Amino acid sequence: MIPYLHIGPLQLPTFGLMVALALISAAYVLQADFDRRGMNADAFTMITVAGLLGILGAKLYHLLETPAEFFASPVPLLLSRYGFAWFGGFLGGFGALLVMRWQAKLPVWEFLDACSPAASFGYAIGRIGCFLSGDGDYGKPTSLPWGMSFPNGVVPTTERVHPAPLYELLIWSAIGWLLWRLGAKFLKRPGHAGEVFCYYLILTGVARFLVEIIRINPPWILGLSNAQVASAASVIAGCILLWRLKLTQSPSQ
């Protein structure tokens, strides 16, 4: 693994570099979606702000999962380069995007549809950073031929484990591609605003829930990890919202 790149006296964390690449890629995808929808907005500014607040949300959510440890030593943990929670990042970034959508006076459902493929591709590329740094996001020990060890990772292991970040790279790239194609299809058939976003909630929720089965995160409620509970909530919300949208957008209404 390559936790850091050494360029002369500089030591650059690969995780941070991949997060930056993920934000840039997401901005390009989002701008392309804005353009094809005829929406006048600056995706690069939006993604920059949402990305920064998403990182902050991911850090705070992770720290508050263990409040006793956090309050015992808050400053070092806040400044640490490690420890980020996916759901906290989603809440921080999503909230920022909604505020900027309101400021730009963009239609809410079309805006959320445009954000969905960009979010999927950005997440996929960001997981490369987890893989390169070996930050502990890998899975349980496995005897499968593609199992990998991370002896030089930030959280090292000499056991062969599931390379979970690579699974997520492939799965979220496929989800992003599917959502992009659905967006193109729905643009030709009015009456589907918001449905791409619903499928984003459902597909990413299912994917994360399944990936967590081979991860090593501790159980939180009913034997489910924190991420699995959040994923289940995402699937349920997506299904209910999709049902409501189909009901209100039905030609018979």
Image (cartoon, rainbow, N blue to C red):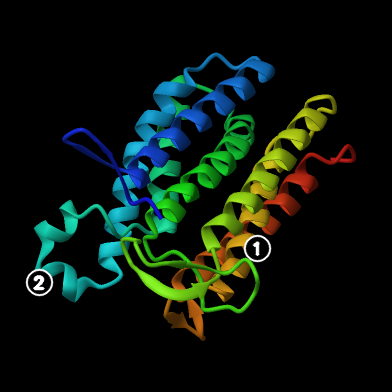
Q: Which residue is mark 1?
A: 206
Residue situated furthest right in the rendering: 252
Which residue does the image show at 85% across and 28% down from the upper left?
189
In the rendering, at what x and y percent does residue 176 appear? 66, 41
Describe residue 163's horizontal placement relative to residue 132 as left or right.
right
**Which three-letter amino acid code belongs to the residue tagged 1?**
Val
Front-lying residue, 131 or 173: 131
**Which three-letter amino acid code belongs to the residue tagged 2?**
Ala
Which residue does the image show at 42% across and 80% down from the upper left?
218
Quarter of the image where the C terminus is located: top right
Describe residue 40's horizontal placement relative to residue 71 as left or right.
right
In this view, 70 is above or below 177: below
Q: Which residue is mark 2?
A: 72
Front-lying residue, 47 or 108: 47
State the SS at label 1: helix
Mark 2 in CB contact with mark 1 (< 8 angstroms): no
Quarter of the image where the N terminus is located: bottom left
In the rendering, at what x and y percent does residue 132 appear? 42, 51
In the rendering, at what x and y percent does residue 67 appear? 21, 71
In the rendering, at what x and y percent does residue 27 appear? 50, 27
State the SS at label 2: helix
Which residue does the image show at 34% across and 68% down from the upper left?
156
Distance between mark 2 and mark 1 Cα atoms:
35 Å
User: Within 10 Å of the Cα at label 1, are there few (<14), some (14-19), or many (20+) other Cα atoms?
Assistant: some
Residue situated furthest bottom in the rendering: 222
In this view, 177 is above or below 73: above
Front-lying residue, 191 or 118: 118
Describe residue 167's horizontal placement relative to residue 195 as left or right.
left
Pointer 2 or 1: first along the chain: 2
